[in-house]
Amino acid sequence: FTFHSSLILTMTSKRRKSSLEKGREEGKKKIKENLCHRASFCKLYQKIVENNGEVAGKYDGAVSGIVWPFLKECKESDEEWLKACQILLVLVVDQEEGSSASLFDDMQKLREVLNTLFYDSDSKDNPEIMQFCSILLKSKSPRTVVLSLIADVNLLQLMSERRLELELKKSASLRRSFSQAGSKPKKNWTDEWINGLLQYFEGEKKCVEESNEDGTTELSRSVLEYLHRSLELLIDLLSAFDSRQFLVLYLNSMNFTVRCQFSLNESPLKNQRLLQQLLSRVYRLIEFPVGLDKTPRSKSEVISSYHSRATIFQKLCHRYYLEDTEEVIYAGVGLLCNGNFLPRAMGGLSDYNFLDLLHRLRLVDKDNCKKGRDYLMATLLHYLTPPPYPLDRLKNFPVYPSERILFDRSLIPPSALLRKTPPLATSKLQIQFLSYLDYLLRNFELVRLESAYEIRSDLVDVIKRLKPVVRQAIKEESNDVFLKTEFTGWARMALEIDEPVRLVRVTPPKLGENVPAKVIAEFTVDLVHCGDYIRGEWESLSEFDTLFLVTVDANKMTNAPPPLLKELEKEFNIRSNEDSDRHIPDNEDDTFPERFGVTAIRGCMVLSIRDENGNAINGSNSNEIRDNDSNVGTKRTFTIELDTAQFAYDSRSKNGTEIYQSCNLVVRRHGRENNFRAVLETIRGLMEGSGSIARVIPSWLQPIILGYGDPKSATYDSSIIRSYAMKTPGVAKPDAFLDFGDTFLDQKHLIESFLESKVVIENEENSMGRLKTDRQNYKVQFHGDEIKASMRNFSSETKGNPVRFTPVQIKAIKSGLSLGLTLVVGPPGTGKSDVAVQIIANLYHSFPNQRTVIITHSNAALNDLFQKIIARGDIDERYFIRLGSGERDLDVESSHDFSRVGRVSHSLERRAALLDTVQQLSESIGISRKEERGADSSSSYTCESAKYFYDYHVKKAVDKFIEVTKSGGADIDRSFPFPSFFHLEENTVGDKMTMNDAEVKLKYIDGIFSELEEYRPLELLKSQRQRTDYFLMKQAKIVAMTCTHAAIARSRLIKMGFQYDNIVMEEAGQMTEVEAFIPLLLQRGEMDVAISRLKRICLIGDHNQLPPVVKNLTFARFSNLDRSLFARLIEFGVPYIQLDRQGRTRSEIADLYRWRYKNLGDLQHVIDSIEYS
């Protein structure tokens, strides 16, 4: 009020009185709101206290509606401040939603809340604080506040002076950051937190232990949860550059991982498996091969850095302890970096000298170090031994899950059974990634575990249906009685193995690898008990299909019931609820193998199936052979390829490869469910060539994919994209005309689409000022607020675009035509597909030499998009191709399908028709005779001879005609060279040919020969495979496939040399991260080309509707596996275009979801039509 007093004094008395009354009203309203918020909070607090702090999803909306508004008005000195902070903590953690973090709109107030929670004595060692921080890290602004408090440059001031001096010498950027840091803080929560963790691990803090009946001890549930949540937060912080830069240096200065791991190795506690897994992940992230400058480091660079450390270590040994470390001094650096050499070679050095040596290496402070020699040796080994390179670890991962992975609850947690998400040792897909290798590693792990969860459900269902039991049997040789497993039930997807698995061939490892190159095996099943339909399903298994070999030993069955849910809740320290006395479902039970005697599960890939005579019956041939039962019999021998990594692991185990001979069951799955292997192998292949990703993905997109840089830098109007367009050859300049084609239905539509700009229509013939209502094609140029449009004729032979696009849809089409990244959010009924179709058609007409790839999530959406494009009629169908099995469901009018084989057949048919036309032209001018045709009246020409005919006869005749008519005095009818071909002999005087008519006819003839040139390679390529590859590589301009097929076909497309310039993804909101990422990498990055060929990336979808389908909801909640790349880019801040007019439903129905979108209105026909009223 004081601030505005001078303004009020200058008003008239009436206005002054009005302003004062308004101020009083606003003040009263503010006080009333404050009292209301306070009363609501007190009521909420009382309810939570009465329930003993149990919230359990009972207070949805309380954070945004009560607690946070109250905190914004409350002061730290207020009596209820601490209570409100604690209630906020409890409710946000209970919701477990990243969206909770986006509610915080006052960052200064959030900072005050965090400071209160961090330094409140009652909040010490509270695992909920760790969860709260992890949730806040998911949103951009709250993340900045959290990092400023727990992972900023002040961490460097907590390091020892000697270690800090060493690190600052290594990096100039680190020195600049440190120079900007303030004075050393008196209290630092991160320092207290990390030191508290170490005190728990090293036993300085008392951990309440619980004794079990078997005499083992366990950490108390509360302490264990605190350690789990702390390591989980630490992993989140180490997984992104903005939070790990200073934290890694701080943790290394404390030897954090060495101290924790060393303490755990000496601990006899039983329940520390998850702790070990979490610590291993912390170690791998600290040592991840990426520099402080965000530059990825290759394996050779990592090893070289450790060799440099070994050299420094040798120099110190030579300078100070020459006699005691002579063996170390003269050893090779590779030997020093081997963990088995140093413990023996350093045996002659005393404990004191050993401590002094590590002090000189700045690994420990000898004045404060009270650890023994074993710890010092562990510290030295950690310093000198390079960690396994992530890609090497990945090569040893089996693609198929075994029973050890399938029923490990710490890897594959229960889905939707627990009220709270338990801590897990799995990756998270956050907004930021360290490198492409890190990005692919996380996706590989999560896709592998999610597919394993689905496989587990199928295997459990099959084994339960088979009902294994123990029966007595007698050995024929010795008449000894033994117990055997029999199956009294039946399952459609499983068969008992008749003759055990036998190894056929084990190929030695390739150079530099430690797993066999290939392992081939065989087994036999008997189909005698199968009906014809089931028998046909087994015999129709084709090459590369996946099977699972299972060992069920009924002797080891416990027949125990599944554990109760409350036992699972106790394990994860989660409060029980009213539903806790029910049993865990079998597909979620990790004791299922013991209960049903499952001892081994191994995956394999089918190579061939043979009958009793050794005849191959895979796929289509099976029906022919099965007609003759006397030749086929009922036994089928499967030749399979085993997982080489799993085989190498099994061969080193106690029972060796006997585990394969013990398998007594083979299980198959539906083909659509077995794509996981192809997807995993594709991701693995991408990681092996992760360096080439930078050459395939445009430079302007790379930082955005990894979650860094300016999120607006990849849009078409950014300075980076404009500069890229100006400097890149072969790319349209920023101010060039964009070919909108038939986007605009008339001139009025054109002007209405750019109401905020001045539209100038060039080559306008209408001098009366009236707008043309007929269809025209337009090219548009944008100059600030002025828009120039150039017209050209619209072909009446095509249907073209039938949609009157809204201005926002036009904006989306413009962005899709322009260089860069385009995100289009389409609420229900706003015409996403129509926009996508128009973008694709315009790209085809604007850039005829470029190839566009269409990607969707489902076959139905792809076919719908494909049909709409073809229905336009303005793109020749010879330039289309549809990859994948969904092509058979296409409903379009064409003589051949749109698969590769169908397109080749269509091209051959079209070639024959054109050659027949050439024959007619040749006969019409007397070059050929009808007698020269083939026996079936086919043309005597080939594409090659047709080219000669055009060059030596047609072109000469056309040139002569143009020369004669150039002066304008010649008779066009008499001079036209092909009157017989066009049946012009009977023309009357009134039907005189004009020059325009002649040009149209000559253009038609030129089109025949130019199209034949495209078919000429089909005459040289004789095999169908060569022809289909050629069509895909050279002729197809629009290639459509699903994201799953893109993952399956990528390796083959790369080998073929497939290339493309534009990519349009529909249903982008329903694709997982990696499903949307792989289609960007369907071409090879050339070593000698510095610029990516990919020019336009258009993602269209709606992340507010259906997210990606993830069956294990724990992975969806904990790991963000159900967040698409599309949603992550929007969350990161990449500008997007939201379509704002819906035309599908009545306005009242649209009101049900209108709140979810900004400014979503209705199209005019929804407002006016009786059908929508």
Image: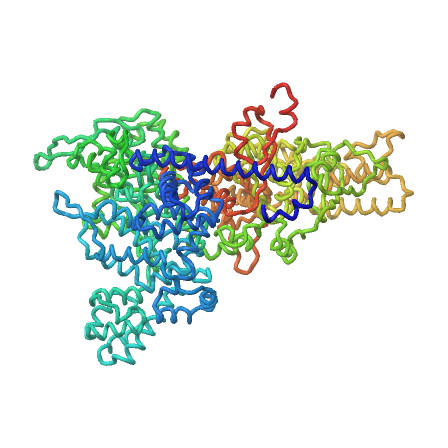
**Is 144 above or below relative to 853?**
below
Display coloring: rainbow
**Is 196 above or below relative to 587?**
below
Left or right? Give the position of 949 relative to 497.
right
Left or right? Give the position of 495 relative to 60.
left
Left or right? Give the position of 1102 relative to 210.
right
The residue sitting at 43% across, 47% down in the picture is: 75
Judge whether residue 1031 can be spotted in this image: no
The residue sitting at 81% across, 38% down in the picture is: 998
The residue sitting at 45% across, 37% down in the picture is: 37
Q: Give residue 630's position: percent from left, percent from top.
A: 30, 28
Please identify the residue farthest to the right as the structure is shown.
969
Please identify the residue farthest to the front as the structure is shown.
13
The residue sitting at 34% across, 35% down in the picture is: 46
Q: Give residue 640's position: percent from left, percent from top.
A: 32, 42
Residue nearest the observer in this picture, 489 or 306: 306
Residue nearest the observer in this picture, 866 or 973: 866
Displayed quadrant of residue 255: bottom left
Residue nearest the observer in this picture, 1089 or 236: 236
**Is 6 above or below relative to 874?**
below
Screen quadrant of the N terminus: top right
Judge whether residue 35 can be spotted in this image: yes
Q: Give residue 964's position: percent from left, percent from top.
A: 87, 45
Q: Give residue 1009's position: percent from left, percent from top.
A: 69, 43
Left or right? Give the position of 484 relative to 702.
left
Displayed quadrant of residue 808: top right
Count the labels in the image: 0
Residue nearest the observer in this picture, 617 or 531: 531
Displayed quadrant of residue 479: top left
Screen quadrant of the C terminus: top right
